Every structure is written in C-alpha cells, then in structure tokens.
Image (cartoon, helix red, strand yellow):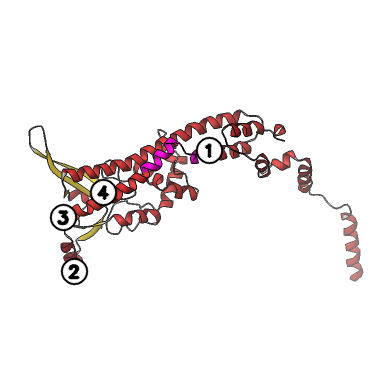
C-alpha cells in the first residue's frame, strides 16, 4: 500500500516526531552522562547545604535565633530581625595576595532552583533557567512544555518562539518573580517551592545577603564551590545531549523532506531500528483514508454536497394546499 502513497506534511511530521521521540529516549553516552550529572547534583546539594547550615549556625547560633523570636513575639516589628534565607555570601581569609597580605575570598552561593551557577548574585540568566528546566525535564515534558528550548536555541537571537517556550517552562515550574531568598519568597509555587523549601537556614539581620558575608574555612569554601560546579555540570551535560539529538533531528528533517513516498520514510525508520506501523500511521492521518480510499473519498464528497430533495417543490405545494384546506 505505501508504494502508492505520496509523502505529505502530515506524514513527515508524524514520522519525524515518532523517530525523534526514540532519539530522546534511547540509551546513549550523552543521555546517561546527563542523568548521572543530575543524580550527582542531588547528592552534592544535600551535603553542601548540610555544611552550609552548620556554617550559618556558627555565625547565628540557634539559641540567639530563638531568643530574638521570643523578643519579636513580645515587642513586635522592632525586633523582627530573624529571617530564613537560601542564599549566602560565604568568605574565608586563608589566602594571601602577591604582597603577602591576607585577602578575603568570598562568593554568593544560592541553593534555590533558580540560583546562580557562577557566584554572581543575580536572577533571570539563561543558565539558571536551563538548570531548572533540565532538573525537572520529565515533569515539564509531561505537561507539554519544551525543557530543551534553551540549548536548542543556543547562539540564536532572542525570538518569540524561544521566549514562548521558556516562559511556559518557568510558569509550569512556578518560578518566582523575584527569585531572591527571604523567609517567605511568597511568589514561589509548585515545583520551585517544593525544591527550595528544604534549603532555608535562619539568619540574623535585615540586610540582603551581600552585606553579611558569613565566615567559613577555606576547605568549607572549596566544598561549596564543588557543589556549584556539580550544578553547572547538569547544564553542560544537558546541552551536550540536546545538541546530539538536534544534529540527528536536522538530518532527519532533510531526509524526510526529500522523500516522495511514505514507503521511503517507513524504510528509514526500519533502518534506524524503529518499528512504524504503516497501517496505523495512515489510519490516524487526518486525510489518509479519505485521499487514498475511493469509497471514503466518494462518501466524503457526497456528504459535502448541499443537495435538495427531488420532491422539494412538490412537497412545498402539498404543504401549502394542506394549510389552505385547514383555513
């Protein structure tokens, strides 16, 4: 049957999506490296935050936090100086400069889903979005979103297609409009809130984290840097995997566009080790049966005709006569 069926846009799209879906789910070195990086990050995230909490509590002892909360309850807003945060400036003074003087080494470490990956305090950068999309990739795919949009659009100018899919992913994840910590980042919802909730620690002071560098040792600082590198590795491995899929998909599009007959697309899928049910492909095609089955095509055309009944005129006359006889 397929030898007589010409390829069309709908068949190309169906074959492309089916084959690309296999590309995304088959076990490859790139895919396994991404999954391993994400799993490794989960371990690093927990261990790094456990350490961060210890460091924070050295500077802000739990008993002091509890005392201040008692004062807040007693005196109200004037004593409202305790808050929860998920991002911190950690600093150590164990390095020296070229002149032998002690120097401070500090950086911003954000344990939130959209936290920075480079130590620079800020929000809304593409690598932050990509990490969030990659981390919850399966959940976003299940909701009809495209969590691979950023690596797919890497190097391209901002455009409506890219913006649309990035916004869809961020909305589905519940991205905060601000992204900064604070005890109650009330803008957080959904998966973003679920991810962030375990990673808050009590701090004393009303200033932003930039103005309160928390002392740590050089060894502790290096462990925080390793955690942040694990987060960046998720983005890197996600990019590599998506790039490999995109290159395959580009060649697939070229081939399918050149094919004149459906049989050629079926043969390609078979050569790739992908089973495509030709009958099901034609059956589920919106026009397949209509175009290639004469009976169905004839019935469809007949159904499109606004035919009048042969006795329409006679029926109208009889109806009029009946009406006049009654009246």
* Disc 4 to disc 1: CB gap under 8 Å: no
Q: Is disc 2 placed on a helix, strand or loop? A: helix
Q: Residue at x 38, y 42 (%)?
A: 36
Label 3 neighbourhood size at 10 Å, few (<14), some (14-19), many (20+)?
few
Q: Which residue is drawn at 90% across and 59% down?
A: 317
| Mark 3 vs mark 4, CA separation in Å | 15 Å
Q: Which of marks 1 and 3 is nearer the N terminus?
A: 1
Q: Which circle, 2 or 3, is nearer the viewer? A: 3
Q: Which of marks 2 and 4 is nearer the N terminus?
A: 4
Q: Is disc 3 placed on a helix, strand or loop? A: helix
Label 1 neighbourhood size at 10 Å, few (<14), some (14-19), many (20+)?
some
Q: Residue 186 lies in magenta, yes or no? A: no
Q: Residue at x 61, y 28 (%)?
A: 258
Out of 216 and 78, give the one closest to the viewer: 216
* Disc 1 to disc 3: CB gap under 8 Å: no
Residue to which mark 3 is pinned: 58
Return the mark for residue 48: 4
Q: Which circle, 4 or 1, is nearer the viewer? A: 4
Return the mark for residue 20: 1
Q: Is disc 1 placed on a helix, strand or loop? A: helix
| Mark 1 vs mark 3, CA separation in Å | 52 Å
Label 4 neighbourhood size at 10 Å, few (<14), some (14-19), many (20+)?
many
Percent x, y of residue 156: 42, 33
| Mark 2 vs mark 4, CA separation in Å | 30 Å
Which span is picked out in magenta?
22-37
| Mark 2 vs mark 3, CA separation in Å | 20 Å
Residue to which mark 2 is pinned: 70
């Amino acid at each position: 049957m397929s030898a007589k069926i010409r390829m069309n846009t709908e068949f190309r799209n169906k074959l492309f999506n089916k084959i690309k879906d296999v590309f995304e789910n088959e076990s490859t070195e790139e895919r396994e490296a991404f999954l391993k990086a994400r799993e490794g990050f989960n371990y690093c995230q927990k261990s790094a935050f456990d350490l961060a909490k210890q460091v924070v509590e050295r500077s802000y002892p739990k008993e002091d936090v509890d005392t201040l909360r008692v004062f807040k309850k007693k005196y109200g807003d004037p004593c409202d100086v305790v808050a929860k945060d998920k991002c911190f400036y950690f600093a150590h003074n164990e390095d020296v400069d070229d002149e032998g003087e002690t120097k401070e080494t500090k950086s911003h470490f954000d344990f939130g889903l959209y936290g920075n990956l480079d130590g620079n305090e800020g929000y809304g950068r593409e690598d932050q979005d990509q990490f969030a999309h990659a981390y919850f990739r399966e959940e976003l795919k299940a909701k009809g979103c495209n969590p691979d949009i950023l690596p797919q659009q890497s190097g391209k100018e901002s455009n409506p297609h890219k913006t649309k899919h990035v916004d869809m992913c961020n909305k589905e994840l519940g991205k905060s409009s601000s992204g900064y910590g604070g005890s109650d980042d009330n803008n957080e919802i959904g998966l973003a809130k679920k991810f962030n909730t375990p990673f808050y620690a009590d701090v004393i002071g009303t200033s932003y984290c930039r103005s309160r560098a928390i002392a740590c040792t050089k060894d502790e600082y290096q462990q925080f840097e390793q955690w942040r590198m694990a987060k960046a590795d998720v983005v890197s491995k996600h990019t590599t995997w998506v790039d490999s899929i995109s290159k395959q998909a580009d060649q697939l599009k070229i081939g399918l566009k050149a094919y004149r007959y459906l049989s050629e697309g079926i043969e390609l899928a078979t050569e790739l080790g992908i089973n495509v049910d030709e009958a099901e492909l034609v059956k589920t095609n919106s026009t397949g049966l209509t175009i290639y089955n004469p009976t169905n095509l004839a019935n469809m055309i007949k159904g499109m005709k606004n035919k009048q009944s042969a006795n329409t005129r006679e029926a109208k006359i009889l109806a009029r006569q009946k009406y006049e006889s009654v009246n």
